[in-house]
Image: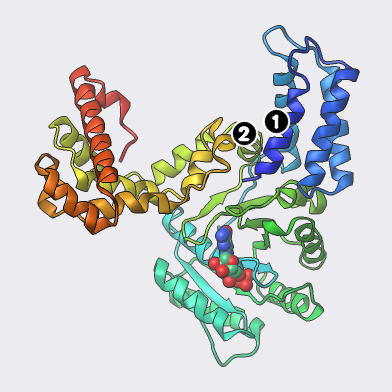
Amino acid sequence: MFNNLQDKLESAFKNLKGQARITELNVASTIKEIRRALVDADVNYKIAKEFTDKIREKATGEKVLNAISPGQLMVKIVKDELTELMGGEEAVFNAKGNPAVILIAGLQGSGKTTFSGKLANYLKSKKGLSPLLVAADIYRPAAMEQLRVLGEQIGVEVYIEPENKDAVSIAKNAIAESKSRNKNVIIIDTAGRLAVDEQMMTEVADIKNAVNPQEILFVVDSMTGQDAVNTAKAFNERLDFSGVVLTKLDGDTRGGAALSIKYTVNKPIKFVSNGEKMDALDVFYPERMAQRILGMGDITTLVERAQQQFDEEQAKKLESKIRKNKFDFADFKAQLDQIKKMGNMKDLLGMIPGVGAKIKDLDISDESFKGIEAMIDSMTPEERSNPDIINGSRRKRIATGSGKDIAEVNAFMKQFEQMRDMMKNMNKMGAFGRMMPGMG
Ligand code: GDP
């Protein structure tokens, strides 16, 4: 995420390396580079300039303490200002009401429908609410169908009136219907257009006036940089929305939208969407995002994702197997599945401080697990639970079955053995209980 920006900021901070103090002179080139980095990330020049002016003021005004170098101080100042630029505190998302009404707006292709599904999934599984999705895109039958399929996938009811050509009445009917269906939150997915268009705006504004939503979320594709910001302005003028959702942050976005939207429309980013899977949704925390931009990682989010997938029952079983030195390939595969559920691999690794920049050019995708999974799948159930019986001829069969060569199978078996040895040693040291509580 934001790799280019991250590189350029890092190189800007290098200017201060070896300097004993921050002075107007030595800070000038750093400031200039930061500004260029922001403009290259598609941040509007005026915002970039104002941002760096603030940085200069803060940096030259601060005393550098002995314990911290000018470079470190600069990173801290930039982190604080980035956090501020993106909204400072975490924004409140209000889903209280009977029912709570959430209106989703944005251009076609921005990720509205996908987000509507994700939000319903989030409110249901994390907040214990009972959502109803409403398909109010009357122009594209495919959009209704897409929402219906998503609803089915996440186990959330979808309200559809295929013959009704009046989006306002669909929204009103859905709210009336929600009472009899015992739904306490309604998510209305509206129609978008490829560009800002008067008819679309009027329609969404009419729905807003008719249903009085407590949240209007404007969904925008973060890959579109300054265009995203301009679209946000147009929607905000008509709808006075309550928050922004940035989508496709898993792609190769430069960062401009994330950095300038709050400044431009003065509305907070509330959620970020980073993948096509229904659980690829994060609440937006400005400080964590600033840390990630600066390559400081985001351990908090990583731990939260792990906790979300944590299954206590399964963890206990696993622990007992490890204690008895019975960890096998089936357990290994189950662990892989859990990790995959936490999200995109590269994204996860990028949350570890210092790792993001190092792996940015590597092609790490969920595909990287495929080879290992294929090998485990090519084992018989007996081999999976009794790794010790896997001799030479069995290895040959596994290699053929998984399309790997024998050397790869041997290397994998060796790694697995090493892992088991490590677990055995941890058992001996009694360290297990303390070191692995979060693994599940
Ligand atoms: P809508 O027209 O605004 O309703 O947009 P859709 O929800 O149909 O999304 C348009 C395309 O973007 C679809 O192919 C989605 O799968 C994809 N998409 C949506 N959100 C994300 C995201 O966060 N990451 C990625 N990679 N793709 C997304």
Could you say which disc has been placed on residue 295 in the image? Answer: 2
Q: Which image quarter holds the C terminus?
A: top left
On the picture, is 347 further left or further right than 438?
Answer: right
* Picture residue at 27% right of the left edge, 41% below the top: 412
How far separated are the C-alphas under marks 1 and 2? 8 Å
Q: Residue furthest bottom?
A: 163
Residue 426 picture quarter: top left
Q: Which residue in the structure is indicated by mark 1?
A: 10
Q: Is residue 100 among the parts visible in the rendering?
A: no
Tell me whether the residue at label 1 lies in contact with that at label 2, contact meaning CB atoms closer than 8 angstroms.
yes
Indicate the secondary structure of the residue bearing disc 2.
Answer: loop
Position of residue 414 measured from the top left corner of the image (x, y, whole percent): 24, 35
Q: Is residue 304 above or below residue 274?
A: above
Q: Position of residue 312 (x, y in %)?
A: 27, 42
Please, what is the three-letter code of the amino acid marked with disc 2?
A: Gly
Relative vertical location of residue 61 with respect to residue 178 in this rendering, above or below: above
